Image (spheres, helix red, strand yellow):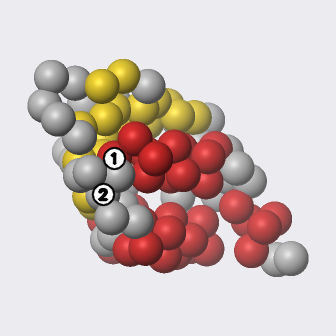
């Protein structure tokens, strides 16, 4: 994780842990978590478009699969804490968690 020159702006790389990638249940869990966080979080795969972590449709069509390395960008006063929460969530196998 690295702070940028802009205050309260943090980038973090994470590898997607869910077997289904960010589709269906895992995407819904990411959106649910993102809406509870104060920072605005976007996701980027490779050099593709920025995807809002709060948009289920964007996540479902983002083509993000298990093992993909994605970049999270959080902006806001709680950016550092919030990007950590989101990175930990995305790195997990969310399909198994949804079934418990």
Q: In what quadrant of the picture does the N terminus appear? A: top left
SS for tag 2? Answer: loop
From what the image shows, is residue 89 above or below residue 69?
below
Q: CA distance from mark 1 to mark 2?
A: 5 Å
Task: State the image quarter where residue 25 is shown.
Answer: bottom right
Instruction: Pick the quarter of the image with the C terminus.
Output: bottom right
Residue at (82% x, 77% y) in the render? 99
Label 1 Cα neighbours within 10 Å, binned few <14 / some 14-19 / many ≥20: many
Q: From the top left corner, tell me how far across and down residue 82 is, in percent.
A: 43, 52
Q: Which label belongs to residue 79?
A: 1
Q: In this orientation, which residue lies closer to the viewer: 1 or 60?
A: 1
SS for dot 1? helix
The local crowd at label 2, few if under 14, some if 14 to 19, many if 20 or more residues have their Cα within 10 Å, is many
Residue 54 in the image: x percent, y percent? 34, 69
The reply to whether callout 1 and callout 2 are in contact (CB within 8 Å) is yes
Badge number at residue 39: 2
Q: Residue at x 81, y 65 (%)?
A: 96
Looking at the image, tell me whether mark 1 or mark 2 is earlier in sequence order: 2
User: How many numbered marks, from 0 up?
Assistant: 2
**Which label was assigned to residue 6?**
none
């Amino acid at each position: 994780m690295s702070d940028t020159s802009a205050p309260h702006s943090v980038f973090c790389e994470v590898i997607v842990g869910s077997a289904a990638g960010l589709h269906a249940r895992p995407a819904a869990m990411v959106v649910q978590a993102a809406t509870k966080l104060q920072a605005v979080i976007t996701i980027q795969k490779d050099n593709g478009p920025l995807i809002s972590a709060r948009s289920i449709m964007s996540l479902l069509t983002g083509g993000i699969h298990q093992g993909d390395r994605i970049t999270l960008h959080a902006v806001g006063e709680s950016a550092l804490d919030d990007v950590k929460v989101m990175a930990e969530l995305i790195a997990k196998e969310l399909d198994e968690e949804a079934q418990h």
